[in-house]
Image: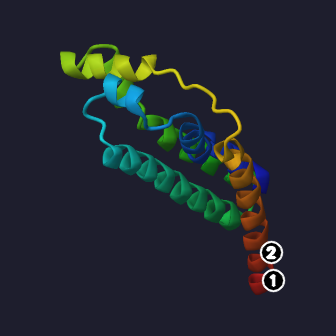
Amino acid sequence: MLPVTVIVNDEGVLAALFIYRHLVYNDEIIAQHHLLTRLRYIGFNLARFTDAILYQIVVFFVLMQASEVLDIFLNFAALRFLMEIDKVPFVVAANGYLTEELHEAAREVELIKLQGKVNDFRQHTTKIFFAFSLIAMIVGWTLVQVIFG
């Protein structure tokens, strides 16, 4: 089940790394989104990545705490629901149920296309993090088994 905890978090860490890998802060971004300063860009990505890491830790502890397989699946379903519920305000704004400014901003976000970068270290960050997460969880699981086993 340990690899599942990393894969289940596809909306979190892997999405944050995907954005880091494909979206470079440059003049084109500044021209399209004049309110996005470098500090905001870094702050938003750092907040997203931190949220994903904390979610990964919660998933690991939920997995270690469960005594039956059914408990694991129920906990994953509950956590997945919590991950999806935060998308509701964006969908509401994108559908135009809020202010016109929010509707336009949500539409702009939906239209952003990310280009792949070639020959860059960023291309390997997702693979490196996936391997690191898997190793960290196996080590954590081993420690729990040795200490409490």
State the scheme by which the image is colored. rainbow
| x 51%, y 21%: residue | 113
Give the left or right position of residue 11, taking residue 130 as reference: left
Q: Amino acid at mark 1?
A: Val
**Mark 2 closeness class: few <14, some 14–19, many ≥20 residues within 10 Å:** few
Q: Position of residue 53 (x, y in %)?
A: 55, 57
**Image spot of residue 43 (x, y percent):** 37, 50
Q: Amino acid at mark 2?
A: Thr
Residue at the disc numbered 1: 146
Report which residue position mark 2 lands on.
142
Q: CA distance from mark 2 to mark 1?
A: 6 Å
Element under label 1? helix
Asked whether the viewer can see residue 70, the reply is: no
Say which residue appears at 26% left-offset and 29% top-offset: 34
**At x 61% / y 57%, what residue is drawn?**
59
Q: Position of residue 117 (x, y in %)?
A: 63, 32
Secondary structure beneath disc 2?
helix
The answer to whether residue 117 is seen in the rendering is yes
Which of 139/59 is in front?
Answer: 139
Q: Quadrant of the C terminus?
A: bottom right
68 to the left or right of 21: right
Residue 67 vs residue 18, the one in the foreground: 18
Q: Is residue 95 above or below residue 16?
A: above
Outermost residue toward the bottom in this view: 147
Q: Position of residue 142 (x, y in %)?
A: 80, 74
Q: Is residue 146 left or right of residue 93?
A: right
Point out which mark residue 122 bears.
none
Question: In which quarter of the view is residue 78 placed?
Answer: top right
Residue 146 located left or right of residue 106: right
Mark 2 and mark 1 residues within 8 Å of each other at the beta carbon: yes
